[in-house]
Amino acid sequence: MTTTSTHGQPGCLITERIGNTPLLRCEKLTRDLPGITILAKAEWINPGGSVKDRAAWSIVRQALSSGQLSAGKTLLDATSGNTGIAFAMLGAALGFPVRLCMPTNVSPERKRILRAYGAEVDWTDPDQGSDGAIRRARELAANEPEKFYYADQYSNPANWQAHYHSTAPEIWRQTGGQLTHFIAGLGTSGTFTGTTRRLREFNPTIQAFSFQPDSPFHGLEGMKHMPTAIVPAIYDPALADRNIEVETEAAYRMVRRLAREDGLLVGISAGAAMVACLQVAREEVRAGRAATIVTVLPDSADKYLSERFWDEEGWAYSI
């Protein structure tokens, strides 16, 4: 059986499968919250398994068209995992080498995926988190500018533009324009920044809440505690109506709850997103307001199954 690509040829380019992810209704989470609807974008449907496929492809597409990523150059970037995997996938598919800087304490699954795609990795100090990886990438780019195209996902406007042009219009279309709140986490901040900017153009009354870890030392892989981290150049703190802090343990509990009660096997940042959604939902119920809350589930649990929290006894589902 063959499929037809948008170019009219048999088959489908891997880049054509990025985006247009389904919007899931989380009914069990809201069964005791009258007037509340929580909807979530299932971003693990993307070919690289995460929301970062959108930003990575936007960055690569612009770099190729501008000639910045030309023949003989290696794409270089710092990553905590998902964007690096997306770059590695695109490099393998489109034929350019990829070098990544990444903390050594990322999950074993991430390391194996990158090895499978053939990416070269510089492992950095886990105690420095993503900031240590950023410093190493900057060093490499400065020392050999002729060798690398430094993608710099934390500063590259093509990151947030991916969500401005794809994620937000999809959400608007899928909800029929009926959403009242948008909630997303802060890592590079691209998802929150781009989606919020476009949604506000559709309807300026939409409430946009960002969330981040509640401390510098956390287990929400890929997310930044902005007060103590290298702040991404694309981050615009003025966009958020409010910023919500999420505890790592609450995210872990939510991940387990979603697996057991909803059949959704999602990643840790997705669990954190649901924690933030429930907090806002309960506030709206107490205020006597109905709400349609939309969030993004960045990836599935596939890259986190080696984490120890899955093996803990006496799981508590209450959030």
Image (cartoon, rainbow, N blue to C red):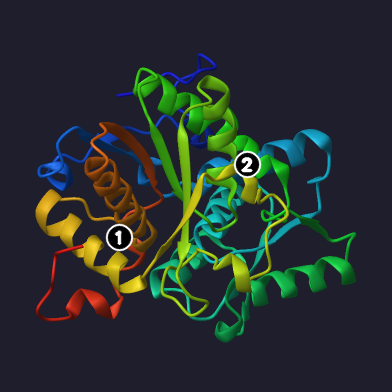
Q: Is residue 215 left or right of residue 228?
A: left
Assess disc 1: are there few (<14), some (14-19) or many (≥20) residues with their C-alpha within 10 Å of its C-alpha: some
Q: Which residue is mark 2?
A: 160
Query: Where residue 270 appears, x then y in whole percent?
Result: 35, 55
Q: Nearer the viewer, mark 2 or mark 1?
A: 2
Kindly identify the amino acid type of the residue bearing the numbered disc 2. Trp
Q: Is residue 267 left or right of residue 253?
A: right
Vertical order, 292 against 53 (above or below)? above
Q: Which residue is mark 1?
A: 301
Kindly identify the amino acid type of the residue bearing the numbered disc 1. Ala
Quarter residue 178 falls in = top left
Q: Nearer the viewer, residue 105 or 236?
A: 236
Assess disc 2: are there few (<14), some (14-19) or many (≥20) residues with their C-alpha within 10 Å of its C-alpha: many
Q: Is residue 173 left or right of residue 277?
A: right
Vertical order, 195 against 116 (above or below)? above
Q: Is residue 11 visible?
A: no
Per the image, label 2 sits on a secondary structure element best described as: helix
Q: How many marks?
A: 2
Query: Where residue 218 appears, x then y in whole percent?
Result: 44, 76
Q: Nearer the viewer, residue 7 or 64?
A: 64
Furthest-top residue in this view: 8
Quarter of the N terminus within the rendering: top left
Residue at 57% across, 28% down: 198
Marks 2/1: CA–CA distance: 24 Å
Q: Which mark is residue 147?
A: none
Quarter of the C terminus within the rendering: bottom left
Residue at 55% across, 55% down: 83
Q: Nearer the viewer, residue 26 or 113?
A: 26
Q: Nearer the viewer, residue 84 or 282?
A: 282
Residue at 72% across, 48% down: 156
